[in-house]
Image (cartoon, helix red, strand yellow):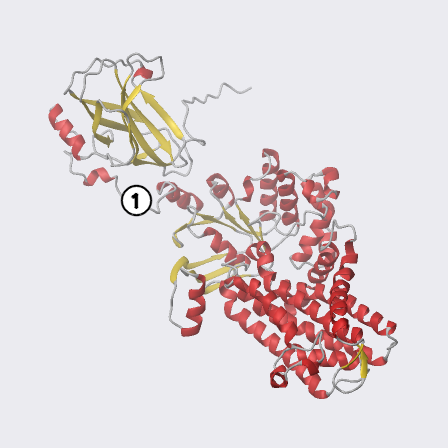
Amino acid sequence: MITLLHHRRYILENALHDFRHHYAGTGAGILWNFIHPLAMVAVYWLVFSALMPTRFDAGDHQPRSYLLYLCSGLLPWLVFGDCLRRGTTAFRDHAAYLKKLAIPETVFSAKVVASSALTMAISLALVFAVAILEGRGPDWTWALTVPVLVLLLVFAYGLGLALGTLNVFFPDLAQLIPILLQIGMWLVPIVYAPTLLPSGLRPLLALHPYLPFLVGLRDILVDHAVPAPVVWLGMMAWAALGLVAGSFVLRRLRGELRDLL
Amino acid sequence: MTVTPMIAVDNLGKRFKIYEKPWYRALEWLDGKPRHAGVWALRDISFEVPAGQCLGLIGANGSGKSTLLKILTGVTVPTTGTARTAGPTLALLELGTGFTPELTGRQNVFASASLLGFPPGYAAGRVDEIAAFADLGAYFDRPVRFYSSGMFVRLAFSLFLFLKPSVFIVDEALSVGDHQFQQKCAREIHRLKAAGTTLILASHDMAAVQELCDQVILLRSGRIVRAGRPEEVVARYYAEANLGTRRPLPAVPPAAAATVPPAGAPATTLGDEIEAIRRDSILTTGPVAGVGGLCILGVRVVDDHGRPAGLVRVSDFLTVQVVVEAREAVTEPNFGIGLVDRFGRPVFECGCRNQHLDLAPVATGTVFVMSARLRMSLTPGDYSLLVAVGDSAGHPPNTGTVHDRRMGLGPVTVYWNEPWLPFYGIAALETCFTEVGRL
């Protein structure tokens, strides 16, 4: 933690730099940060609004906007997935630094999360825009999305630390993670209604790390409700578990990590 | 008076785990059974460096210098023991690591300083000095990707010099840039040292090591072979002739233990001589080239006392003796020898014809002995020997038919054991210095 504070300037400057230069040299430049999530939303919305009525029922017989339902779950998930993918390759991507400079490994995981935080802010702004367009105007509960998304990013940081370390030893992991993320996305009701899930699978749903975050975000953004304490507990538990896993794996393997890069 | 050392290394060791397959590591985690081979890159390393002193690290490639430096900078985690530096440590291990090509020289100075965890004001106060030292002119404010490799190195070196660490690690970096910049760097390093910066210099440049260092450590296979005054340790380094890793250096030239007649009692007849050469022959089953006709039966290398020798001091003599059998008649036989250095460069090759010695024709079945006495005025190191016989008849100058050519013999080791080297470079030219006079 102290090392992260010590290197905060580097982390933030570089996250900003990565964010700005990720699409450097392209015509639309920084706009791609908006175009990508919008395109994803457009695809799912076009496909699923044909399957589901635009005012659809999430299970409690209250009609809702499918678009808002979709965006509130999908956009944060896309950022989370991207953050995890980049966290997995963070140490290999920065091998040149790790091999030669005594910069703590955590700096590079933090950098990934910091740039994801910027993308997350953009995604959140898009969700707010959709909500306003759908007539679900600004509400004070929106402020609660910040702690939810911070907890999600803390979880991503811890998990990224563990995966990034393991990926140095087993590079196949970088290939495996996108597949797992793809499967993970369809296991929780992000794009479909929870009622579509076979009832036998529902108890297993509780084990999905994204579930409390998804429920919390939907409560706030779709229903303007404060998430239940058990949801908050779920989010905090995953965030804490992520941090513990990350620091445990890194501490165990730190001695060999840079020898293998 | 007890002075706390700037660098304290205690019982340091680094062991690398080698796995045949990457997933063996996972299996090992699961069942706890070791499935790796361990290689100790460093073992039992202990030393201290007082503040303001310079430590030299020397040794052949692969002796563990880089691993030790990486542990000192905190990049590599040691397996055993501790390494402690009392203050910020900067290394020139890889110049310009962390430079972003799109940023200008000036921006990179700030970015690198922040990367290394220095506060923002730190680089700002020094950027003008850095710009002046790097001497890049307008290029200082252009993106680094337009830099030549020399400019890149100058910027990196200037940056590291002016970040003013307590411990400064220089690894072969002194041989960068043009001659003028090298001298400037050397002066700056002297100045840093005078100002109390503790230095570690890992180098193959013995002149620099002797000039800058207060103590020197010689590493071989990850262990300290010798530590002490620069002259002593550098002499030992040369005595090992850059390659001591492969065989231990005998205390006396190997000849002393050889089976030949003692000095002063050379073989009496040519028959005895031929027998002795063939007995001590260093011929191997290595590469053979040639069309046959003249055949090399034995090659021996002896010192001036007639003792077989594989080791010679710079500028002492060695004699190469070769037994040749003519399996067919040759009208213009020629004989030659050569030396190849450890980089594969032919250092010297010479035949009888080059020296205007025209050998008489030989008849089928003749066995004859050739010898070449060489002054080994070469830089210390390992040299492999080649010998060849052939026929010059009907060929223009500098050409001929090779009958038998044997390469890669030896090696012959040239060593030196005094602080002042006799010369620098590949080979010694006959040189005569004279002070013509003073006004």
Left or right of B17 on screen, residue A226: right
Q: Is residue B266 visible?
A: no
Residue B289 horizontal/vertical position (percent): 29, 28
What chain does badge 1 belong to?
B
In the image, residue B105 lies at what x, y percent? 71, 45
Give the residue drawn at x 33%, y 13%.
Answer: B395
Residue extending furthest toward the front: A50
Quadrant of residue B380 within the rendered picture:
top left
Figure check: B66 above or below A152:
above
Q: Amino acid at mark 1?
A: Leu
Dot 1: what SS? loop
The residue at the point 63 percent across, 86 percent down is A199
- Say if A176 sits above or below B360 in the image: below
Q: Which residue is mark 1?
A: B249
> From the viewer's perspective, is residue B402 above or below residue A15?
above
Which corner quadrant holds the C terminus of chain B? top right
Q: Residue at x 25, y 31 (%)?
A: B303
Residue found at x 18% / y 19%: B328
